């Protein structure tokens, strides 16, 4: 067993770390306060190859592996999870399905600008009635005269309304199967398509420098060839997309947990009470030790799940384990970081107050903790205890 990253993986991690600490971290508080999408940062990340890290080189991407991507994403998110989610939603949700299911022609047409990171691509699944229960999708797409006619709406779609967004892949109901089950299909919708509009950006608790909008489709026509993959395979496609996304959101959570730890450690060393550094109190030391332990475990789980995906193995359960554990680790780390900062940590200018606000979404986006626990439990129930243990230990 080898825990060392390859030279290439290390190169991506270090590149992301240097850029994140030098260019993103110093601006994270202002971006959060002003709720500004950081076009210049995203452009610089595109130039460095980070916005297309795993995307194929033939379309302008960087061709890096999935482990490298998660190492880089942790570093970006350690500086600012708003920028982290912009990178993650573009690569894992927006572009990965086009890479996985797109035709050659679709990849040339839609991936080229996106693989370099000059343009962004979004993924629209969630609706008013279809959150965790994506089968509740109401948006419809009807095939008529060689075109899909889309009607309905989506909500909270990341990267959908920036000045550099090129389009979205949208899950729509294209019929029913066995008379009852919705037939869900993925359809590519370029940004300038008539009948496709975006509503106002949301006011949010965290990820405030990232971009989310509601999407509206009113008799929106796109050519039949904008079908992504097979008709009726939308459900399968978004489940597979979300597996990859969950590992990445786990990496993002580890980055945020690490940022909480960084702040907690430096404050613990600096702050004096009762004539000595608070880091000399065992109560504070135990908090730091617990944070470090959990972060290490969460990071290892992210690396394992990412490595399994890279090996082409089934990794759905590991993705859910990583997502739940890392997001909850980050929540506990944010809480303890504020505690170690005391009243200063409750004041908005402090980084830990911002982290405390930002951390909650990690337990919700790309599958809530509840649904991920169900995925883990179901996968265990579906196989014998011995098989499960073998998979957990020896995979
Ligand atoms: C900032 C932000 C960005 C987002 N970006 C995107 C995006 O780019 N694309 C996209 O498609 N979506 C996006 N989403 C949507 C996100 O994926 C959903 O919020 C998430 O899937 C949960 O759906 P919901 O919020 O409707 O919660 P609900 O489904 O309404 O769930 C509410 C509560 O009930 C629980 N619950 C629901 N069903 C069950 C069950 N069967 N068993 C046990 N508990 C259950 C949930 O775990 C949760 O605690 C984004 C959301 C946010 C807030």
Image (cartoon, rainbow, N blue to C red):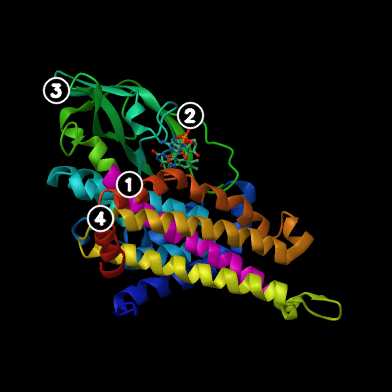
Mark 4, residue position: 384
Judged by depth in the image, the label closer to the viewer, 1 or 4, is 4
Q: Earlier in the sequence, mark 2 or mark 1?
A: 2
- Identify which residue, 308 or 64, lies in the foreground: 308
C-alpha gap between disc 4 and disc 2: 49 Å
C-alpha gap between disc 2 and disc 3: 28 Å
Residue range in magenta is: 239-266
Report x, y in % for residue 226. 20, 34
Q: Is residue 368 visible?
A: no
> At 35% from the left edge and 40% from the top edge, which residue is drawn?
123
Q: Residue 171 appears in which quarter of the rendering?
A: top left
Q: Does residue 39 show up magenta in the picture?
A: no
C-alpha gap between disc 3 and disc 4: 49 Å
Query: Does 252 sit above or below residue 99?
Result: below
Q: Does residue 259 show up magenta in the picture?
A: yes
Q: Quadrant of ligand 1?
A: top left
Q: Main secondary structure of the magenta part?
A: helix
Disc number for residue 378: 1
Q: Earlier in the sequence, mark 1 or mark 3?
A: 3
Label 3 CB-ligand 1 distance < 8 A: no
Residue at the right extreme? Answer: 274
C-alpha gap between disc 1 and disc 3: 41 Å
Q: Earlier in the sequence, mark 3 or mark 4?
A: 3
Q: Residue 223 appears in which quarter of the rendering?
A: top left
Disc number for residue 146: 3
């Amino acid at each position: 067993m080898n825990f060392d990253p390859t030279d290439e993986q290390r190169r991506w991690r270090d590149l992301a770390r240097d850029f994140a600490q030098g260019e993103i971290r110093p601006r994270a508080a202002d971006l959060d306060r002003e709720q500004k999408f950081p076009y210049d940062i995203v452009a610089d990340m595109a130039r460095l190859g980070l916005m297309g890290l795993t995307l194929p080189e033939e379309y302008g991407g960087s061709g890096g592996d999935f482990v490298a991507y998660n190492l880089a994403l942790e570093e970006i998110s350690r500086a600012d999870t708003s920028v982290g989610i912009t990178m993650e939603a573009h690569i894992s949700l927006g572009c990965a399905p086009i890479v996985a299911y797109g035709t050659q022609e679709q990849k040339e047409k839609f991936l080229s600008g996106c693989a370099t990171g000059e343009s962004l691509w979004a993924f629209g699944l969630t609706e008013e009635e279809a959150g965790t229960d994506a089968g509740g999708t109401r948006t419809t797409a009807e095939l008529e005269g060689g075109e899909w006619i889309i009607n309905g709406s989506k909500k909270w779609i990341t990267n959908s309304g920036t000045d550099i967004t090129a389009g979205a892949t949208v899950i729509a109901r294209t019929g029913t199967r066995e008379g009852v089950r919705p037939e869900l299909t993925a359809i590519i919708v370029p940004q300038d398509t008539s009948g496709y509009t975006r509503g106002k950006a949301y006011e949010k608790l965290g990820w405030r420098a990232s971009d989310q909008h509601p999407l509206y489709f009113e008799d929106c026509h796109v050519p039949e060839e904008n079908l992504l993959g097979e008709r009726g395979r939308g459900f399968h496609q978004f489940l597979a997309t979300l597996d990859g996304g969950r590992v990445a959101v786990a990496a993002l959570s580890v980055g945020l947990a690490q940022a909480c730890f960084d702040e907690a450690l430096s404050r613990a060393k600096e702050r004096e009470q009762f004539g000595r550094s608070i880091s000399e109190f065992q109560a504070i030391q135990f908090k730091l030790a617990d944070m470090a332990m959990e972060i290490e475990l969460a990071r290892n789980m992210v690396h394992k799940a990412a490595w399994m995906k890279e090996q082409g193995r089934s990794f759905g359960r590991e993705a859910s384990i990583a997502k739940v554990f890392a997001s909850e680790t980050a929540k506990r780390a944010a809480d303890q970081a504020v505690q170690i900062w005391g009243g200063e940590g409750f004041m908005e200018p402090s980084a830990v107050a911002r982290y405390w606000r930002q951390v909650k979404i990690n337990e919700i986006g790309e599958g809530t903790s509840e649904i991920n626990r169900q995925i883990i439990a179901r996968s265990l129930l579906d196989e014998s205890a011995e098989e499960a243990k073998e998979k957990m230990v020896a995979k």
